Amino acid sequence: MEDRFKVFMAVWILLAIFSLAFQRFNKDVRLKQKIYPWTMIGMGIIFIFFTIWVGAPLNSLFFTVPSLILICFITIRNSRYCPKCGAFVYNWNWFDKVKYCSKCGAPL
């Protein structure tokens, strides 16, 4: 089980590095907007797969799956990309929309 956890951590770290590099160095805002929701959903599915593979009890999925669905939904809903500079803008206020980019000040 310890070896499986090491594989889980290695894959998770590689996915994080790839995702951060893509977000940082890719300037195509439309591509980022298209890929981001699928990336979040894919990461959630990979996390559930690894949770089962590492040996977590299956009844833990009754908590894990709804939690991941909620986390992915909120993250996708609150995330935007600036059309001018391509910066990732996350709205921490759930009840109000972000109107301007925090990096360059352009309207969203």
Image (cartoon, rainbow, N blue to C red):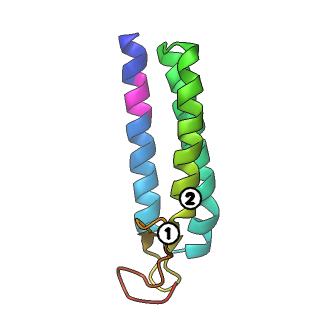
Q: Main secondary structure of the magenta part?
A: helix
| Rendering coords of residue 55 (x, y %) | 49, 12
Q: For the residues labelled 2 and 1, say whether their Cβ atoms are less than 8 Å apart.
A: no
- The image quadrant that residue 90 belongs to is bottom left
Residue located farthest toward the top when viewing the structure as drawn:
1
Q: Secondary structure at mark 1?
A: loop
Nearer the N terminus, badge 2 or badge 1? 2
Q: Amino acid at mark 2?
A: Ile
Residue under numbered circle 1: 95
Q: Is residue 9 magenta?
A: yes
- The image quadrant that residue 106 belongs to is bottom left
Nearer to us in this view, 84 or 100: 100
**Local crowd at mark 1 within 10 Å, few (<14), some, or many (≥20)?**
few
Q: Residue at x 36, y 12 (%)?
A: 2
Q: Residue at x 39, y 48 (%)?
A: 17
| Rendering coords of residue 102 (x, y %) | 36, 79
| Rendering coords of residue 21 (x, y %) | 41, 58
Residue under numbered circle 2: 76
| Rendering coords of residue 40 (x, y %) | 56, 49
Q: Amino acid at mark 1?
A: Phe
Q: Residue at x 59, y 52 (%)?
A: 73
Q: Is residue 11 above or below residue 36?
A: above
Q: Is residue 19 above or below residue 43?
A: below
Q: Which residues are magenta?
A: 7-11
Instruction: In the rendered structure, find residue 11 and report the number of the disc placed on it.
Output: none
Q: Is residue 36 above or below residue 96?
A: above
Q: Secondary structure at mark 2?
A: helix
Q: Is residue 81 magenta?
A: no
- Measured Cα–Cα span from mark 2 to mark 1: 15 Å
- The image quadrant that residue 13 belongs to is top left
Nearer to us in this view, 106 or 21: 106
